[in-house]
Amino acid sequence: MRIEQLRKYYKIEARWTAFPLHPETPEEGLSLEELFAGRSINVKKIMSHLKQVADELGLPLRERKKTYNSRLAQELAKWAEREGRGDPYHEAVFRAYFVSGKNIGKIDELVDLTKSIGLPEEKARSVLELRTFKEVVDSDWDRSRALGITAVPSFVVDHQAVIGFQPYEVLEQFLRTCGAKRRNS
C-alpha cells in the first residue's frame, strides 16, 4: 500500500518516523537464523507469510536470507526528506533491501541509492560520515517507543495506530475514524 493513494483521496500529511528495527544488527548483517536464535520462531513460515501479504498488496519482495542494520538508511532518509526527496528515497531503500537484497547498512550502498534518485553523492556521504541526522533519528526512535509501535509499517493519527501491513480498505477506515477529510474529486 502506497501512501500516495491515501494522499490522493484524503487531506492528510504523512510524516515518516524512524523505528528501531533490530538496532543490534552489525554492519555486515545477520542471517535470519542468527537474528532469531534462541527464540521459537519459524523463519520459513514468517517469510512465507510476509511474501503472501506482499503479493496481496502488490509489493515486490524476494526471499531474503539476511537482515541488515537500517540505522544509517534512516539517518539519510531524514536528509532526503529535507531535500524534498523523501518518498523516492524510501521507495529506493525498500527496493534495495526487500527486492535486491542490498546491505543498507553500508555507506557506499546508500550513497548509490541517493544518486539514483537525483541527490548529490558527495553531500549524502558527508551526511552519513558526520552523522548529521543522528539526533533526529534518536528522537524518532523515542517517539516510536512512546507510541508503543512494535512493527513496521505503522500508521498513527492522534496517538491511535494501525500496525503492520494492512489492506487499503483498513487504512481508509482508520483515516475516516480519525476524522480525515476526503478530497473533492
Image (cartoon, helix red, strand yellow):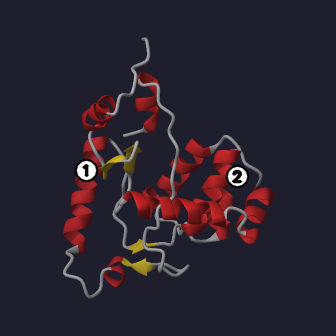
Q: Position of residue 167 (x, y in %)?
A: 26, 40
Mark 1 or mark 2, which is nearer the start of the sequence? 1
List the residue tagged with mark 2: 115
Task: Judge from the rendering whether residue 144 lies leftward or rightward of residue 120; answer left or right.
Answer: left
Secondary structure, mark 2, is: helix
- The answer to whether the residues at label 2 and label 1 have Cβ atoms under 8 Å apart is no
Q: Nearer the viewer, residue 54 or 24?
A: 24
List the residue tagged with mark 1: 53
Kind of residue at badge 2: Lys
Task: Measure the alpha-carbon separation of dots 2 and 1.
Answer: 30 Å
Q: Position of residue 24 (x, y in %)?
A: 47, 80
Secondary structure, mark 1, is: helix
Q: Which quadrant would residue 77 be assigned to in this image?
A: bottom right
Q: Position of residue 68 (x, y in %)?
A: 48, 72
Kind of residue at badge 1: Val
Task: Judge from the rendering whether residue 88 lies leftward or rightward of residue 177; answer left or right.
Answer: right
Q: Is residue 108 above or below residue 163?
A: below
- Which numbered circle lies on residue 3? none
Q: Quadrant of the N terminus?
A: top left
Q: Residue at x 76, y 69 (%)?
A: 130
Q: Residues within 10 Å of mark 1 (few under 14, many from 20)?
A: some
Front: mark 2 or 1: 1
Q: Nearer the viewer, residue 56 or 183?
A: 183
Q: Nearer the viewer, residue 39 or 111?
A: 39
Q: Residue at x 46, y 33 (%)?
A: 4
Q: Residues within 10 Å of mark 2 (few under 14, many from 20)?
A: some
Q: Is residue 53 visible?
A: yes
Q: Position of residue 29 (x, y in %)?
A: 48, 78
* Count of numbered circles in the view: 2
Q: Is residue 73 visible?
A: no
